[in-house]
Amino acid sequence: MKEQMAFEKNVFNKTSRTDSEIAFFGGMTIVYKSSIDLFLYVVGSSYENELMLMSVLTCLFESLNHVLRKNVEKRWLLENMDGAFLVVDEIVDGGVILESDPQQVIQKVNFRADDSGLTEHSVAQVSRTS
């Protein structure tokens, strides 16, 4: 746990002060994006294709943007963590990329633009279809 916390702190310190979207740290390839008060990271081995990692990051950001009603910031993410976990679950599983198209992810977690948010009914539907 201490190693993970140190890694996360070092990654944040290295990436929070730059405008680039990619970093190499500790034998890892890291792509990242910031939005207001939130940093999103996708971390892969040094052998991972940066464009594929960036595709996953873009899918994550655009899917969260839809789920959070264009409010991709810490407060909204924390209040809608269940939807965020569903998004991540549709994109990757055990480090394997399953989907990189945000429209497919949104469709799979059963969100529509006119929905007011994640409901128990939509969670039940998603869990039955997964």
Image: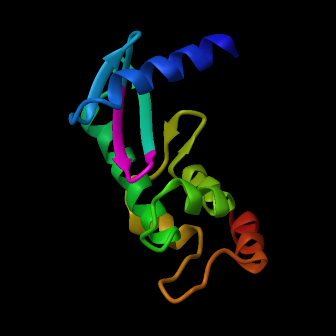
Residue drawn at the location 57% of the way across and 63% of the way down: 76
**Residue appearing at x 38%, y 61% in the figure:** 62
Q: List x then y, in percent, for residue 73.
A: 48, 57
Q: 49 or 68: nearer the eye?
A: 68
Along the horizontal axis of the image, is 11 left or right of 33? right
x and y, in percent, of residue 59 in the image = 39, 55
Quarter of the picture holding the C terminus: bottom right
Residue 45: image quadrant is: top left
Q: Quadrant of the N terminus?
A: top right
Total numbered badges shown on the rendered structure = 0
Q: Is the residue 57 above or below the residue 12 in the image? A: below
Residue at image coords 43%, 37% = 41
Most foreground residue, 10 or 54: 10
- State yes or no: residue 99 in magenta: no
The magenta-colored residue range is 30-38
Determine whether, in the image, residue 113 is placed left or right of residue 20.
Answer: right
Q: Is residue 113 above or below residue 16?
A: below
Chief SS of the magenta region:
strand
Q: Identify the residue at horizontal 24%, vertical 30% (top origin).
A: 18
